[in-house]
Image: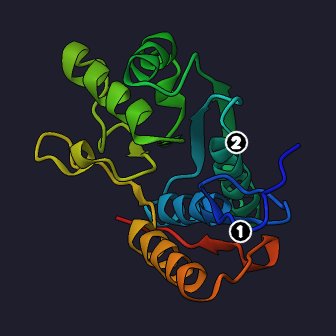
């Protein structure tokens, strides 16, 4: 249990807390998952594999948003638990699933690290071609996602909006001592890039 003290501004980034005295500023991961479902449907994908680790609250929200929207769009999806949320976990998942990847025309990795691991495996082994055998989408828009070598489709976190909100609330608190709480918390919509 956490309760902020009077006179202290507590801002939690990318973790939603409904606690008195705590301001949460988060990416709307559920909406981001829905964006991925829309994108893959627009690309003609009908059967999508999701790579996820259930210990990630953000990833779980992304999967929920995806599966809710996929159901509305009539897409078939399967969630596969991976060992972690790292590039090496993406590599391992691609290695274990390479015989099954042909069953899917889209793959959604709940973060870019997993997606980059899938890409690494594809380049190293040549057992599948991303963009030809299946579409691949990540989430977070890390720097490597836009490199010429991979050009990963991903969901960009709303960092500028989050930073602006932090600046706003810090300014309000400094000038007026205003207290904040769950009612002031904000979810920012990400964008597909």
Q: Nearer the viewer, residue 127 or 161?
A: 161
Q: Residue furthest right?
A: 1
The C terminus sits in image quarter: bottom left
- Left or right of residue 170, residue 21 in this image: right
Q: Nearer the viewer, residue 129 or 13?
A: 13
User: Viewer-nearest of labels 1 and 2?
Assistant: 1
Q: Earlier in the sequence, mark 1 or mark 2?
A: 1
Residue receiving disc 1 = 7
Task: For mark 2, give the secondary structure.
Answer: helix
Q: Nearer the viewer, residue 94 or 111?
A: 111
- Name the residue: 35% across, 25% down: 117
CA gap, disc 1 and disc 2 = 30 Å
Q: Is the residue 176 above or below the residue 118 in the image?
A: below
Identify the disc placed on residue 57.
2
Q: Is the residue 33 above or below the residue 109 in the image?
A: below
Instruction: Place residue 52 in its image quadrant.
Output: top right
How many neighbours does mark 2 have within 10 angstroms: few (below 14), some (14-19), or many (20 or more)? some
Name the spot of residue 7 as percent of width and height, x first: 71, 68
- Left or right of residue 116, residue 137 in this image: right
Name the spot of residue 143 as percent of width and height, x first: 24, 48
Name the spot of residue 63 as percent of width and height, x first: 67, 47
Q: Residue furthest front?
A: 7
- Name the residue: 23% across, 19% down: 126
Task: For mark 1, give the secondary structure.
Answer: loop
């Amino acid at each position: 249990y956490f309760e902020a003290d009077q006179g202290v501004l507590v801002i939690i980034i990318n973790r939603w807390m409904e606690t008195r005295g705590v301001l949460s500023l988060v990416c709307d991961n559920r909406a981001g998952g829905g964006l991925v479902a829309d994108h893959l449907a627009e690309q003609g994908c009908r059967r999508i594999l999701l790579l996820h680790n259930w210990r990630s609250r953000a990833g779980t929200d992304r999967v929920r948003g995806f599966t809710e929207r996929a159901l509305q769009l009539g897409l078939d999806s399967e969630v596969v638990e991976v060992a972690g949320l790292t590039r090496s976990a993406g590599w391992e998942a691609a290695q274990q699933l390479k015989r099954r990847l042909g069953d899917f025309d889209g793959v959604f990795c709940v973060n870019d690290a997993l997606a980059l691991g899938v890409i690494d495996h594809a380049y190293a082994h040549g057992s599948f071609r991303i963009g030809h055998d299946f579409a691949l989408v990540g989430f977070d828009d890390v720097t490597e996602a836009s490199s010429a070598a991979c050009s990963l489709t991903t969901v960009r976190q709303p960092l500028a909006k989050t930073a602006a909100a932090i600046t706003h609330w810090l300014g309000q608190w400094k000038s007026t001592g205003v207290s904040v709480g769950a009612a002031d918390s904000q979810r920012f919509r990400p964008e597909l890039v």
